[in-house]
Image (cartoon, rainbow, N blue to C red):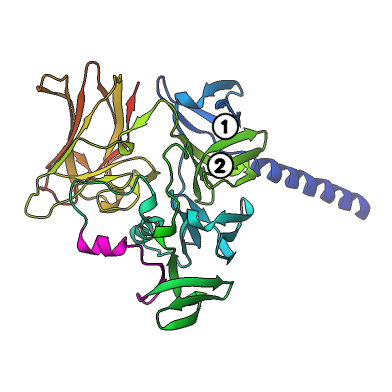
Amino acid sequence: MSAIRIIIAAIAGCIVSVASAIGAELLPFSDAVLIEGTPFRARLQSLNADGMATWTLPSGETRNLSLADLCWWGNWVGTPAQPQLVLVDGSVIVADVTSLNKEKLSIGWGLGGELKLPLEWVGGIIFAPSVDRQESDLMRFRLRGDGHPDVSAHSQPASQKERVENAPDGDRLILLNGDELQGEVLALDENVIKFRTLAGEVSIGREKIAALRFNPSLAAKPNSKDGQIWIGFQDGSRLLASTLTIDRSQAKIKLPAGIEFDVSAAKINAIQPLAGRTKYLSDLKPSGYQHIPFLDLAWPYHADRNVAGSQLRAGGRLYLKGLGMHSAARLTYDLTKPYRAFKAEVAIDDQTAGRGSALFRAYTNDGSGKWQIKYESPIIRGGAAPAPISVDLTGAKRLSLLVDFADHGDEQAHADWLNARLLP
């Protein structure tokens, strides 16, 4: 009798183990947003080298779709307060750094295993991320330096602080007590960092270090054609990849840095192609920007960040692409070729904690000099879900986005144009 019980228990254990393994390999269904057509819920099944993806629908049916026709799929996971590597193209890998030399840096990534990255592609390392979301965002943007094409662009000249911060001044150790050391990192292990300063060599315990920024003058200069697709992972990592292919349960990824590796496809929870037919406004240079302060505080706009310079978030979700503006402001783009429509989601950024309000408007110009209003929102308030908008661009030569005062002047008017995009 006891032997039968042992056999039954063993079978039950095997069933549980198999069920757990199967569950671990399946991602939840997420929305796929298309250039044309209605979004649909699906699970990414495969992706070949030609960019043709096969999706499994909740019904069990499959659907084939070229990535050129996809805006994005899935939801981005926020980066947790864990050690992370920041690449100069904006990629973030949640991983422990194990060692470095003058040419490569080695990391132990829970999803991708041991990776060796060319040092010129590494903007910096965050050893002790802040639990404050905005501070953590700003540190990542700081470490990726000048090499990323999406860093904040605006019409105003850089401040003295910004010029000093971005100066090619060697490596920088940023300590938890707020002090910074300038010099050259010599070695790193699991306990200490050896660093050469003008005063000589020092060894500092990793427990005292917030972050390490590598010399931006030695950083690679990413080409916008190198990064073809954003890939999001369940652990909060985000990679801008040159290529992505998925065959059954395995994903093969190649980075602009030249390294290739495999990860479990089940760990991917979002993709956003940049080489498709969608053109994001944040990747274009505007022809004009004007901000009219409510009192005397001037705000620049930001590309792929909110107006305060941190990650775009609205409705509890993270967005990689979009524009951050502040009332009252106007941002204008010349349309160098015909586009069918402009689409976005408008919202007050979550950074305001439910406060703030603004009006959103979109205007077009057919080249005659006369502007026509094509979209006007109701009052958009903090805490409200992002509202989708669509603007007809037939015959338009210019597009102008306007954010205006609403309930309380410019108070907390952190306006987001999320995934602001032109469609052919």
* Residue labelled with disc 1: 44
* Residue labelled with disc 2: 268
In this rendered view, identify the residue nearer to me: 35 or 284: 284
Name the residue rendered at 82%, 50% in the picture.
Answer: 9
Please tell me how crowded label 2 is: few (under 14), some (14-19), or many (20+) other residues with Cα within 10 Å: many
Task: Kindly indicate whether the residue at mark 2 contacts the one at mark 1 (C-beta within 8 angstroms).
Answer: yes
Name the residue rendered at 52%, 54% in the picture.
Answer: 93
- Inspect this view and state whether residue 233 appears: yes
The percent coordinates of residue 137 (x first, y second) are: 37, 56
Q: Point out the residue furthest to the bottom here.
A: 199
Q: Is residue 194 left or right of residue 344?
A: right
The percent coordinates of residue 139 (x first, y second) are: 37, 61
Task: Give the quadrant of the C terminus.
Answer: top left
Q: Is residue 365 left or right of residue 272?
A: left
Asked whether 8 falls inside the magenta stretch, the response is no
Identify which amino acid the numbered label 2 is placed on.
Ile
Residue 327, placed above or below residue 35: below
**CA–CA distance in space, label 1 to label 2:** 9 Å
Q: Which stretch appears magenta?
A: 159-180
Identify which amino acid the numbered label 1 is placed on.
Leu
- Inspect this view and state whether residue 57 appears: no
In this rendered view, identify the residue nearer to me: 183 or 148: 183
Residue 327, placed above or below residue 93: above
Residue 94, placed above or below residue 101: above
Q: Residue 324 is drawn in which quadrant?
A: top left
